[in-house]
Image (cartoon, grey):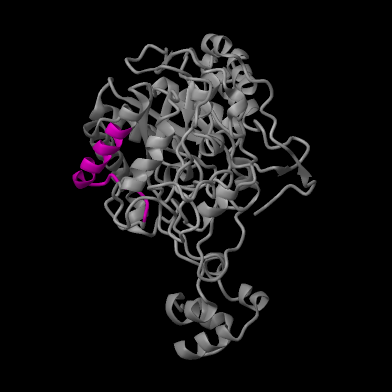
Amino acid sequence: MWKPPEKIRFEPQPGRWPDSGEAQASRLFSPIRLGPQQASTIEMASRSWVPAMVPWRASEDGFVTSDVLDWYRRFAEGRPGAIVVEATGIRDIPSGPLMRIGDDRFIAGLSELVDTVREASGGKTRLFIQLIDFLAIRRRPDPQVYFDRYLEITERHRSALGGELDEAEIRARLKAMSEDELAGVLSRREMESLRLGYRERVTDMDLPQIRDLPEQLPGLFAGAARRAKRAGFDGVELHYAHAYTMASFLSPLNTRPDGYGGQREKRVRLPLEVFEAVRAEVGEDFAVGCRFLSEEIFEGGGTIEDACYFAQRFAEAGMDFLSLSRGGKFEDAKQPSIGAAIYPYTGRSGYECMPGHISDEKGPFGRNIGPASRIRAAIGKAGFKTPVVVAGGVHGFDQAEAILQKGEADIVALARQSLADPDWFAKVRAGRGREVRVCEYTNYCEGLDQKHKQVTCQLWDRLDLDEPGIKLAAEGKRRMVAPAWKRSGGD
């Protein structure tokens, strides 16, 4: 994983905890309505938010499992204002233990998930589901396998090797070359496929499935949103962030010549068309927002100016909320080992998405607050009040409350801190903040995610392993959910 060269070690800084009266009167625990003018029918009881995290607990076929129910039940017990269910695939295609919503057969399990959260939160927590599309990606191949099986030999290769060679001879010659020599024979994309693994891009217009994305995606997202509504969710979050399809349309690297790439106005066209299709499918009484990037954090990537423009267009279109992240891109990710897939959180952009306790002078806390404030101001300048959700290293009450009081965002999201202590919200609201299990930002959880292992937190996954009925992770050494809050003092 990339780390800032300064390598300054930071300790958690949650600050002062409020008493129950102050917490109850705070902006953080005040209600908010969603929508461009905060006048929607969807109201949250508080401005606290658990953003989408993929815990790798779905079945291999993408169905909700009992482990999925346990995971979200545990967050719901803390009664945050909203929980966003993990990135859930909109296509009906095999994608391993990633939840799916691309067919009606998934609705029953998703309905059970909704019921579980409603019951555990006493109906206090709104439940959204994040809808994602992603393009094909392959693991980094063994070089011998790549040259034998994957590389398509062309006249360009034959010409570069300077002779009338048959295909077998060309492959043999390539296998014997150093990486520097190969760079003079293979194209940039071929070298990338060898070094990192093949991946599709939204600019691969020679591929029919890529060329047809503008025709396919609005209907796929709309169908997924319809199923989410049938399952009982309060809304959907369209995943327009990180290394995935919709974020790639928004990126300056999108140079498609078909009216969906190039200038900002064209890059935002498909995200708006997707939203319009979803809104037409689910109506106005169902929340529809998106998560997108305040900055892409790589050379030539999307800037804060891009994000302000997109935010204004999304607000104008009628999105109910805008949730901000940053970075997390393939473009600067580290080379994976042979047999592993490239992971978009291993470079600098990935660090900015999930900054850790080893940091630069800025530290790991609240790095996205400044950009979020600028984006919120741009929305206001355009005449809208669409709620902005900010995330990134928030773990203390004073920090969260200051964000809201200063108008830097409207809703505060806690991801890793919620994982460290799903009861953060309940404890702080009750004036019991000193009992919070505070995230140390070691990114232990992120390391598990990278390996597609069941995600847990090192602060609790080895506690009370002999607890009756406790479920353990696949290797049998970690508990799957945080221990229950053992309240003291008669409450």
Q: Residue 362, located in which quarter of the rendered image?
A: top right
Residues shaded magenta: 97-116
Q: Relative to residue 441, is residue 396 depicted above or below? A: above
Horizontal placement of 435 versus 231: left or right?
right
Q: Is residue 410 visible?
A: no
Residue 377 on image: x %, y %: 58, 18
Residue 219 on image: x %, y %: 26, 40
Q: Residue 371, located in which quarter of the rendered image?
A: top right
- Per the image, is 376 magenta? no
Q: Nearer the viewer, residue 119 or 150?
A: 119
Q: Residue at left 54%, top 46%?
A: 463
Horizontal placement of 362 versus 450: left or right?
right
Q: Residue at left 56%, top 87%?
A: 173
Q: Nearer the viewer, residue 14 or 362?
A: 14
- Per the image, is 98 magenta? yes
Q: Is residue 267 visible?
A: yes
Q: Residue at left 61%, top 16%?
A: 18
- The dominant secondary structure in magenta is helix
Residue 354 on image: x %, y %: 60, 42
